[in-house]
Image: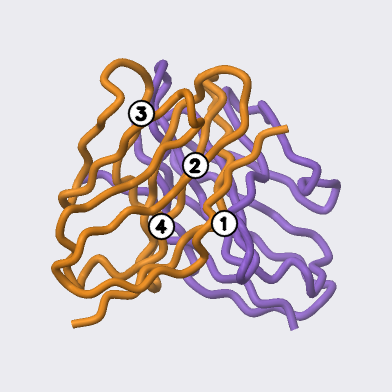
Chain colours: A orange, B purple
């Protein structure tokens, strides 16, 4: 069964601090990996994606994520958090079909202190 | 920038009533999806749709649910005889007909069953 784990339900950081949100998946092969962000009252916006190739991917808003096959992880990072980054972040996995069903983690709520 | 549009943003309905949630996918996309997120829980896949038929559905998508593409632009989710536990945020998504592509999500419809 597909499983995506985001172990941190809620993270609080100070503005300007670095951020790492964790994501682990369980799947036999290398899936396609995504991070989405949801601001209050908004839909799910794609931050970045990994299909193959370079394991460090850059996304929008200064975010990056690193795929580590040995750890089945796809952690999201940002070197300096801005107050506007406060939102809920979802890791999602696609097993790799063209009709991609996404499996989502439970989400990590990010609070940013001024 | 093209976007997925969902209407209404919020729907309140009485238990037992039928509701139709509407979505306008991005115009050149051919794969369509519905997901839902019960408050405090994961975003869950409901159904994918391609070439005017269901491609895959989850165990949640029982006979109470149906999807339709009534014309060239709309994609609808119908819930017959709504139950209290159908209260959730429903997200529509669409993607291009190509390998290794991401899904674009709408802003969601908040369904409240009373």
For image coordinates 46% across by 36% down, the residue present is: A73
Q: Disc 4 marks which residue? A: A89
Q: Secondary structure at mark 1?
A: loop
**Image disc number at residue A92:** 2
Q: Position of residue A33 (x, y in %)?
A: 43, 33
- The foreground one among B13 and B99 is B99
Q: What numbered label is drawn on residue A106? A: 1
Question: Which numbered disc, 4 or 3, marks the residue that appears first in the sequence?
Answer: 3
Q: CA distance from mark 1 to mark 3?
A: 19 Å
In percent of width and height, residue B39 lies at 62, 71
For disc 1, the neighbor class at 10 Å (few under 14, some 14 to 19, many from 20) is many
* Separation of residues labelled 4 and 1 (CA atoms): 9 Å
The quarter of the picture where residue B36 lies is: bottom right
Number of residue marks: 4
- Whether labels 4 and 2 belong to a single chain: the reply is yes
Crowd rating for badge 2 (residues with CA inside 10 Å; few <14, some 14–19, many 20+) = many
Chain letter of the residue carrying label 1: A
Q: Residues within 10 Å of mark 4 (few under 14, many from 20)?
A: many
Residue identifier under label 3: A50
Q: Quadrant of residue B79?
A: bottom right
Looking at the image, do the residues carrying marks 2 and 3 touch, with CB atoms under 8 Å apart?
no
Query: Contact (CB < 8 A) between labels 4 and 3?
Result: no
Q: Badge 4 sits on which subunit?
A: A
Residue sitting at the far front: A70
The x, y position of residue A20, in whole percent, is 32, 53
Q: Please, which chain is the residue tagged with disc 2 on?
A: A
């Amino acid at each position: 069964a597909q499983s995506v784990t985001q172990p941190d339900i809620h993270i609080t950081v100070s503005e300007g601090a670095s951020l790492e949100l964790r994501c682990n998946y369980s799947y036999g092969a290398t899936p396609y990996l995504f991070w989405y962000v949801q601001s209050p009252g908004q839909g799910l916006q794609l931050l970045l994606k990994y299909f193959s190739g370079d394991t460090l991917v850059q996304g929008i808003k200064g975010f990056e994520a690193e795929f580590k096959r040995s750890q089945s992880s796809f952690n999201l990072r940002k070197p300096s958090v801005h107050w506007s980054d406060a939102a809920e972040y979802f890791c999602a996995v696609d097993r790799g079909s063209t009709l991609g069903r996404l499996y989502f983690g439970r989400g990590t709520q990010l609070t940013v202190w001024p | 920038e093209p976007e997925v549009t969902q209407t209404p943003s919020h729907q309140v309905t009485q238990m037992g009533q039928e509701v139709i949630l509407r979505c306008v996918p991005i115009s050149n996309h051919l794969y369509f999806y519905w997901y839902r997120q019960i408050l405090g829980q994961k975003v869950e896949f409901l159904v994918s749709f391609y070439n005017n038929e269901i491609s895959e559905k989850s165990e949640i998508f029982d006979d109470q649910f149906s999807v339709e593409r009534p014309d060239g632009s709309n994609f609808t989710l119908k819930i017959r005889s709504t139950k209290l536990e159908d209260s959730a945020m429903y997200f529509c998504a669409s993607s291009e007909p190509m390998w290794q592509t991401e899904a674009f999500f709408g802003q969601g419809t908040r369904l409240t069953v009373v």
